[in-house]
Image (cartoon, rainbow, N blue to C red):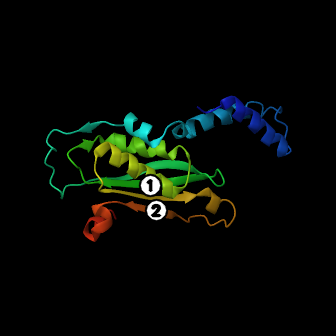
Amino acid sequence: MIDTKAIEEHIRGILVALGDDPEREGLRETPQRVAKMYEEVFAGMNYTNEEIARMFDKTFEEGFEKTDSKEMVILRDIDLFSYCEHHMALMYDMKATVAYIPSGKVIGLSKIARICDMVGRRLQLQERIGRDIADILAEITGSQDVAVILEGCHSCMTARGIKKPGSKTLTVELRGRFKEDPALQMFLR
């Protein structure tokens, strides 16, 4: 579990290291506010991929026992955010497209969005977010035909260092038939 008391102490130390007074009016409650925020935005760090899969394992099998191999599910424009593990900088304006070809069952659509959200709530790399979402979706649905496309802005690129606002990172995780069949990839655009 996330140790909010330790976060409070460290934030207080950071404020001092920045040359500010953590006892001044505007900062007095900042360590507690930051600790509470971290507890929320890093909630996914409390769970493994397997635990997230169990948490959101809501599938439906009726009518999908003999799924036509040409059927697919695509959910686009799923909003999410994360924090870069290199700078603890915000990854924002992130959108996910998640697709899979059912293998005897389908997952509730809201569960796909919840998986994306929970995976993003970790110190992460965008590439790993896509891989983790694909791993969890494959575990829940039993399908090896999974695709995850992520596009987002990284404040470590836009607000510091190179300072290139508007630059976006696109990552693509293709598995099974999505990796092998260019015709299926067309549906992901």
Mark earlier in primary sequence (1, 2): 1
- Contact, CB < 8 Å: mark 1 with mark 2? yes
Q: Which amino acid type is shown beneath numbered disc 1?
A: Gly
| Residue carrying label 2 | 171
Front position in the image: 13 or 26: 13
Q: CA distance from mark 1 to mark 2?
A: 7 Å
Q: Secondary structure at mark 1?
A: helix
Report whether 120 appears left or right of 53.
Answer: right
- Residue 118 screen position, x and y as percent: 47, 41
Front position in the image: 33 or 65: 65
Q: Quadrant of residue 25?
A: top right
Which residue is found at the position 56% from the left and 40% from the top?
41
Front position in the image: 32 or 134: 134
Q: Is residue 74 above or below residue 64?
A: below
Which residue is found at the position 83% from the left and 31% from the top?
23
Quarter of the image with the C terminus in it: bottom left
Quarter of the image with the N terminus in it: top right
Front position in the image: 154 or 178: 178
Q: How many labels were placed on the picture?
A: 2
Q: Quadrant of residue 108?
A: top left
Q: Secondary structure at mark 2?
A: strand
Q: Which amino acid type is shown beneath numbered disc 2?
A: Thr
At label 1, counting other C-alpha atoms closer than 10 Å, the crowd grade (few under 14, some 14-19, many 20 or more) is: many
Q: Is residue 131 above or below residue 29?
A: below
Can residue 163 be seen in the rendering of this structure?
Answer: yes
Q: Spot the residue most to the bottom.
A: 182
| Residue carrying label 1 | 130
